[in-house]
Image (spheres, grey):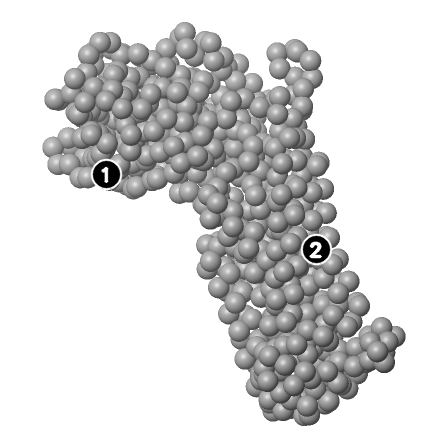
Amino acid sequence: MTTQRTAHRRPGADLGRVTGGTSFGGLLRAEWVKFRSVRGWVIGMILAALLMAFIGVFAAANSSIGCQINGGPPKSGKACLPQIPHGPGGEVVSDSFYFVHQPLTGNGSITARVTSLTGEHANLTGGPVQVGSGYMVPGLASWAKAGIIIKQGTHQGSAYAAVMVTGSNGVRMEDNYTADSAGMPGNVSAAHPRWLRLTRSGDRITGYDSADGTHWTQVSTVQLTGLPATVQVGMFATSPNYTLTQNSFGGTTDNGGPAQATGVFDHVTWPGAALGGTWTGTAVGGGGPVGQTRAQAQGQPGFGHSHGTFTVTGSGDIAPVTPGPGSRYPTVTIEQSLAGAFLGLIAIVVVAAMFFTAEYRRGLIRTTLAATPRRGAVLAAKALVIGAVAFVTGLIASVTSVAVGVPKELNQGQVLLTVSALTEARVIVGTAAVLAVAAVFAVALGAVLRRSAAAITVAVVTVVLPFLLAGLNIVPSGVGAWLLRLTPTAGLAIQQSIPRYPQVTSVLSPVRGYYPLSPYAGFAVLCLWAAAALGLALVLLRRRDA
């Protein structure tokens, strides 16, 4: 009872007296008793959890959208959302393009030569963006597309495989929105046309490209499971919105407008295929020429056909929806509910650093090391205890933030970019793991520097500051990218739930949810920093006097 009263009266006074025995299990128990005996440390962890949950829920509660459709009454939240298409894998997709098609029953192939790909986009610098009113200027988006496609049907989100020319990424073959394979490089022109071919054999679709229509190269073969006997096959054109992203000190500004692409096709053949009837034009998802309403796009063809040459004009995209300025919807990702993890991280590294430096400040480290001469075991026990406490704190806060924040965002009209259960678990558990490893890093710094102010400063500068410098554009984007690769901040990449698809333009920024390293590679960088700090702490702990 005396020891308990002393711990409450003078936090940390008995830290060096609790040994719990000489076994490693005893050391762990001793370090746990030390931690829970200091009220300030416990409060610090509780504060970290509250900050994480509060910021996540607060951000979700203030993400409402409003609208007024065709002069009707004002609406908000879910009532403002259009129908959201989902791909075969369940992901939210953009599926808007102009499709010139015929039905294909059974196996067969289609071949076409593309001789031109041109485009227009909104003039974002010379006047207001008013589509169809003379404010479009020539220009081709890098991921504008025109090619041939085999699609399950004309409804949005249906399975497909397509081979196409692009604005500046050469020939590509894509399927089911997320998969992308590169073909011939270079841009298409009358002098340098591209021949494209798709062949169906059951559920297998194979794409080819050629420069002369004689020598063919296979781009890729894909499997579209459950493809019906009759599909739609033909030519298409589309272009994602034109967006200007300007980085400035303290933030990023996006300015965007519509765009369209026009592809010119000839030598369209379908040897061995049961194609019949006439060509039909469909603006899938309203993806007709820019400036047309959906009704106009359906009634006025976005294509011309004369003497075997097709001219097809469309807008939109065929791709997964990702965070960022190009999204057609007010999107939200699961990690946005974990925005508070950044503040929780600060509180945790402060507590973790003091978990070791407090014993040096009060001179109690001598008692601890006298009772347990195995200095490496003492360091390991402290690291395990603070890491475990930080992990549990982060896990509770992360689960709470997602469980409360995501439903609020959905009710406010946000479109959740869905991910698999494994990815969701990786984001939640990974956030807790980042906090745990950062705590171990901080406790190692405490052992190295032996002063709370110095250890906390170094921990915050290395773990927190790079995120701010890169996310707020305080340093050039190239410098920020390297900071996110090389510093412990790289560990936050474990929260990235949406991949950086090559066929979708994305902005590399932690604020946008994208990191230069993959989630596990970024987490490995943080672990290496923690391991290096522990190694240095062990060497110095053995060499220096207490």
**Displayed quadrant of residue 361:** bottom right
Q: Quadrant of the N terminus?
A: bottom right
Report if residue 261 is visible in the image: no
**Displayed quadrant of residue 492:** bottom right
In percent of width and height, residue 196 lies at 22, 30
Q: Residue furthest top?
A: 299
Of residues 365 and 143, the one drawn nearer to the viewer in this rendering: 365
Q: Are marks 2 and 1 in contact (CB under 8 Å)?
A: no
Q: Is residue 340 left or right of residue 291?
A: right
Whole-Å distance between the Cαs marked 2 and 1?
48 Å
Of residues 439 and 308, the one drawn nearer to the viewer in this rendering: 439
User: Dot 1 lies on which element?
Assistant: strand
Q: Residues within 10 Å of mark 1 (few under 14, many from 20)?
A: some
Q: Is residue 196 left or right of residue 284?
A: left
Residue at 45% x, 18% y is: 286
User: Dot 2 lies on which element?
Assistant: helix
Report if residue 215 is visible in the image: yes
Q: Is residue 21 left or right of residue 112?
A: right
Q: Which residue is mark 1?
A: 221
- On residue 49, which mark appears? 2
Amino acid residing under circle 1: Thr
Does residue 351 lie above or below 271 as drawn? below
Amino acid residing under circle 2: Ala
Residue at 30% x, 12% y is: 280
Of residues 109 and 79, the one drawn nearer to the viewer in this rendering: 79
In percent of width and height, residue 442 lies at 64, 70
Residue at 61% x, 68% y is: 387
